[in-house]
Image: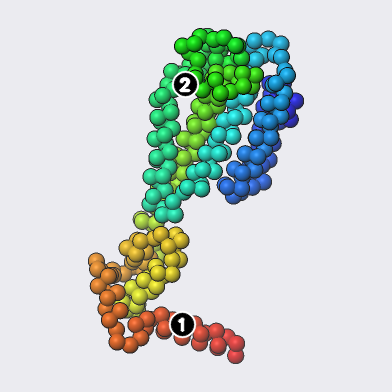
Amino acid sequence: MITSIKNNSLVDFEHELSLILNTYSNDVEKAKKIIIFIEDVLKQLTDWLKHHVFKTIQEEIKFFKEIKPNIVAKLIFYKEILSLVASLPLDKSKRIKHFEKKLDIINQFYRKNREFIKYIKSHSTHFDELYFTRKKYKDIFLNDCAVIIHDAKLCTSHDFLLAEVIAFELLALHIENRIDNLNQSCAITNNQIKSNLHWTAKKVDLIELIYALHEAKVFDNGQADIKEITHVFEKAFQIDLGDNITRSFIDIKNRKTDQTRFLIQLQAALESKIENDYK
């Protein structure tokens, strides 16, 4: 694989990448495996670059403009994915804001580097030798100060910036898809709950059940709001529980006996079913 990359081909790299993508379904596990894989590839390329001499300037430009940035971009992309997933809020309503915040950061990056992005998107080449070759002396006004901390044998002034441009373009598309999926999910939850079931027990019984489920934290790891849960039950079972379910819950708490009357009935009914099935 490294040989083909050295020869200015990404075919084997993309093939190995696709194998990992097809092997793992979990986003976190997938990202971790890909990061390890790419870091190993870059380590081998680093060792090779320390001693390699490109035959022509065009060959060097091709490597630092087309080959290396595309590899580094995938590393940046999957590290960003891992970071996004790790910091994803449990509350669904906050996830869209979480993704939109990242989109704002990407847009700031675009604005800051708009001239360079315009250069890349227009397929310009007049600054290629300046941006994508490892010369010791370049125009001091065009050089990025960050280049000082890099090994001049391993990078050019703009190959990492190009990798970021590629990575953030992929990331923006990924985030927009995630936002679309969340919006569709919300639409299904809010507008498309259709059922022929009707709640025929007392309203207060359903409110008792809703509060029990909420306190047991069975929805969204405990992050779901009581009103949101109530709304779903109302639509699912075609019943109006009123505007103030808190008042009903106070009535439940004020019962002199059997405060969890309905839950006790449910437990008794299920235990009776289990007992009868054993007979």
**Circle 2 residue:** 117
Tell me the distance, in whole angstroms, between the alpha carbons under discs 1 and 2. Answer: 64 Å
At a point 53% along the width and 31% down the height, the residue shown is 167
From this viewpoint, which residue is outermost toward the bottom? 279
Q: Quadrant of the C terminus?
A: bottom right
Where residue 151 sits: x, y (%)? 62, 22
Q: SS of the residue at dot 2?
A: helix
Tell me: residue 135, above or below residue 213.
above
Who's the residue at 55% across and 39% down the image? Answer: 79
Residue pushed farthest front?
149
| Residue 252 in view | no
Looking at the rendered structure, the kind of residue marked 1 is: Gln
Image quadrant where residue 8 sits: top right
Residue 113 sits in which quadrant?
top left
Q: Residue at the location (72% across, 18% down)?
A: 52
Q: Residue 189, image x and y in percent?
A: 39, 56
Residue 93 relative to residue 177: left or right: left
Q: Nearest the camera: 136 or 269?
A: 136
Q: Position of residue 208 (x, y in %)?
A: 35, 75
Q: Quadrant of the N terminus?
A: top right
In the picture of the structure, the residue carrying the numbered disc 1 is 267
Answer above or below: position of 133 versus 113.
above
Q: Name the spot of residue 187 as percent of width and height, x first.
A: 38, 52
**Label 1: how many Cα within 10 Å (few below 14, some 14–19, many 20+):** few
Among the two numbered marks 1 and 2 on one chain, the one whose residue lies closer to the N terminus: 2
Identify the mark at residue 277; answer none if there is no mark. Answer: none
Can I make out residue 49 in this image?
Answer: yes
